[in-house]
Amino acid sequence: MRTKLKLKKFSWFGALLVLVFTAVAIPKQSSAQDQDQEDPPSRVARLGYMEGSVSLQPAGEEDWVGAVDNRPMTTGDKLWADKDSRAEVQLGSAVIRLAPETGFSFLNLDDNTVQIQLTSGSISITVRNLENNDDFEVDTPNLAFTVSQPGHYRFDASEDGSNTVVTIREGEGQATGNGQTYTLHAGQAGTFSGTDSLNADVEQIGNADQFDSWSETRDHRHDYSRSSHYLAPDVVGYDDLDDNGDWRDDSNYGHVWFPNHVDEGWAPYHEGHWDWISPWGWTWVDDSSWGYAPFHYGRWVSVSGRWGWVAGPVAVHAVYAPALVVFIGGGPGGFGGNVGWFPLGPREVYVPSYHVSEGYVNRVNVSNTTVNVTQVTNVYNTTIVHNTTNITNVTYANRSVQGAVMVVPQHAFTSAQPVAKARVQVSPQQIASAPLSGRVAVAPTRESVLGAKASTAGHVTAPPAAVASRQVVAKKTPPPPPVPFAKQQQALAAHPGQPLAKHEVQSLRPANTAASHPMVKQAPPGKPATPTTGHPANSGRPGQPASASPASQPGAPPGNRPGTPPAAANERPAESNRPAPAQPNNRPQPTQPNNRPEATPNRPAEPPARNDRPPAAQPNNRPEPTQPNNRPPAAQPNKPEATPNRPPAAQPSRPEATPNRPPAAQPNNRPEATPPNRPPAPQPNKPEAAPNRPPAAQPNNRPEPTHSTPPPARNDRPPAAQPAPRQTPPPSERPQQHTPPPAAAKPAPAPPKQQPKPQTPEEKKKQEEKKPQ
């Protein structure tokens, strides 16, 4: 009994503790959630590869400038790949490639959403990973497509915005527009036309064109990268490390990557420039082709005088950082107004200069190095909570490494100039005495936002006005458009070097446009619909007929690329419609066997003609005794043959290609058959012209069936392989060969050959004299 009472008391006491704990925990959790709303995304995109002329419009700006490799991209950034140009944008979980004349932007990019705007052109997307709560959406002028599985996707939007072609090589997704939803599966291509109503036609995909092949080649670099064994899968740009350095194991730091294409005395964060990219603020953009992953993830260490990069833990989700450095000076004090910095070393805490929560500081550090969480918490409490990023009582390993610190004038820093050319020499004593900070107290300028090619504003190719201002259909509501830098500049100057918090940016938006996006038309809820199947009315890519679309062009824009099938597949039906005179030259002999069966069902009296076609392979099968019997049947199809030859317009390729091919296989037989076989002088030319000239020579054959002796016309074609038998009959019998079959089989004409010639009166008189009296 006592045991039961004790248990009952304990259960009541436990329930009370749970209630108290819940009451205390809920406010803390809510507070943490409020703080998390200010955290920036843990991922951004990278402009990782370009060919030709590619232009960038930073978020919220109106100017287009020349794009630069390794620039981070986020919500609101736009790209334009001009004619004969291509670009590649990399995410941790996906990669997006732009074909020539393509307009692209991010309507939204955060930890769980990738929302792409395609106003015109073609993009190829490889989705490598898709979590259950992830949204991956591609919005075009007439539909919104939701990717529901990892795979390979292609989107082609027409120049006028009326058509979109979606091709799925692997994966699955749904196209939504005007209240309708169509589901596409792997191996299918959907052509969606119309803006007021969405019409869909689905067919099987064909072979890849050059843009697809280029995309596949780029995917292979990532899929077979050696560096993937040393890094978390969502680290952006690690495949560029393979050809530019080697991995070595270090007893103190584990796997370390050493670059091998750098000059003597090289140090990290020494060749590149600084951009201002919201909401992170000052962001490093490196000049090296491989210079993305080692400058936004991990830490740098000097080993035996050589710099090596130490990546974060492989099993931890990677968190992007704008630059993993410590700043020296900047602002009114330190270095006389110059700005300096050096890279963080392993196990050193990164202090963000932007508004973040304690949880974010933990994530960004734990994902990028092996660090003590308690140490991270202490740094967070002493710097961020107290609204100061000054770092005291911390010894940084790389601060004392010779050549590690880079110092430039403040103007060079804010105008996105290459820092290597603007470097200022400072003494070790100055470096040792200068204050350290996680934030450089320098306000950005317009050049900071436009980047290293700010001077090209207004002097680069940009999308046509109709493309740049075109709305797209969106299923998921994107965030409001970014606020221009000009509206933020005054507030940014009040707190130099610190980006505005989200609620501060929101207050700068006009109240009536806070929840609207002028580039987006919200799609109504869609109901499942069934597309038509087969070839659409216009099988070409949007805006162009199939006949005018060369799939061989690299990255052909939508108007230049044939429908999902390759160009070769589309040419087949086109060939069957071509006029007959072009076919003999377009259809080589190897394709004859496929055409013969097609022509057979269209010719009711063709069987004998079928026997005539292969005579080149059977010249010995028709000896003299069989010729008289073979000629009549061979002659009979001559009349039907004239019949199918007369309507060649209805069947241009099949009937005409059939008579042309046998003669092509018997060129040596024709001259032999001509002299012995054709008694009338005009007749030999007619049959011979018939097989050699498809429809043009056939009018000479048509009068021939009107003769009373048509059989020789058909006999003239097959006997081409039997010249010897036709030379044996005496000339007196040749006319009889043109009689109908019953007369040709009778031997009646032979007796007249034996009758005596008429006698003259002199011969009769001599004969009577010779008679016995």
Image (tube, rainbow, N blue to C red):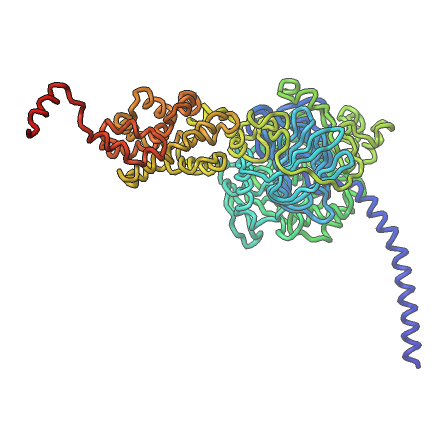
Expressed as whole percent of the image width and height from the top left, the position of residue 448 reads 68, 27
Picture quadrant where residue 595 is located: top left
Quarter occupied by the N terminus: bottom right
Q: Nearer the viewer, residue 441 or 274?
A: 274
Q: Residue furthest front?
A: 773
Q: Is residue 512 above or below residue 293?
A: above
Percent of width and height locating residue 111: 72, 43
Name of the residue lying farthest toward the bottom: 1
Q: Is residue 485 left or right of residue 1?
A: left
Q: Residue at x 51, y 50 (%)?
A: 248
Instruction: Determine the image quadrant of residue 434.
Output: top right
Relative to 398, say whether 499 is above or below: above
Which residue corresponds to the image point at 36% horizontal and 22% vertical from the top-left? Answer: 686
Residue 384: image location, x then y, percent:
78, 42
Could you tell me if residue 120 is visible in this image? yes
- As displayed, is residue 92 above or below residue 118? below
Q: Quadrant of the C terminus?
A: top left
Q: Is residue 765 left or right of residue 118?
A: left
Q: In front: 650, or 587?
A: 650
Given residues 4 and 179, the one toward you in this image is: 179
User: Does residue 451 show up?
Assistant: no
